Amino acid sequence: MPREQGRKVVATNRKARHDYTIEDTYEAGLVLTGTEVKSLRQGRASLVDGYAYIDGGQAYLDAVHIPEYNQGTWTNHPPRRVRKLLLHKQQILKLHSQVREGGYTLIPLSLYFSDGNAKVELALAKGKREYDKRQALRERQDNREAQRAMSTRRHLGE
């Protein structure tokens, strides 16, 4: 059977871009069990409450919900277990120093398969204040209204 090609997105965390200011992104592999992979291939996962942390020189992903596999037996996995992340040592050290000193947090943005391997896109992010969220929403609405006005003007001019 041929290997998978390309990128197949399983889950995204759309709320993360609203709640956080994204500074940098990293791609990390995941250490998963067989039933977790099968459940992900069915497109079932939730990143809503997920976060990553570094402990003892290792990176971990916590509170990500991967539901139990339907046809799984006693070998099924717990849905919200802590999963190890696969990152280079230098990346882990850099992230650890920034999280510890800079007030940043690690949040998962998306969970996907890249050429058959499960990957997670991690973001080094800073939490937004409430007024920052309102300002970003206002800017997005203003841009949308400007685009709408330009398109109607273009249609009337032609």
Image (cartoon, grey):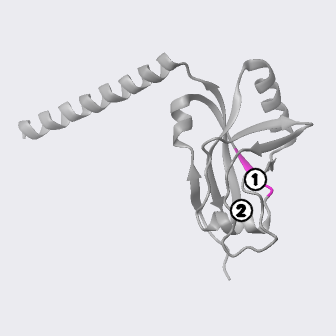
**Distance from label 1 to label 2 (Cα)?**
8 Å
Q: Quadrant of residue 94?
A: top right
Q: Is residue 42 visible?
A: yes
Q: Amino acid at mark 1?
A: Gly
Q: Which residues are magenta?
A: 27-31
Nearer the observer, 156 or 85: 85
Q: Is residue 152 placed above or below 104 in the rendered structure?
A: below
* Left or right: where 129 falls relative to 101: left
* Left or right: where 73 falls relative to 113: right
Expressed as whole percent of the image width and height from the top left, the position of residue 3 reads 67, 74
- The residue indicated by pointer 2 is 117
Expressed as whole percent of the image width and height from the top left, the position of residue 148 reads 22, 35
| Tag 2 secondary structure | strand
- The residue indicated by pointer 1 is 29
Q: Quadrant of the C terminus?
A: top left
Q: Amino acid at mark 2?
A: Asn
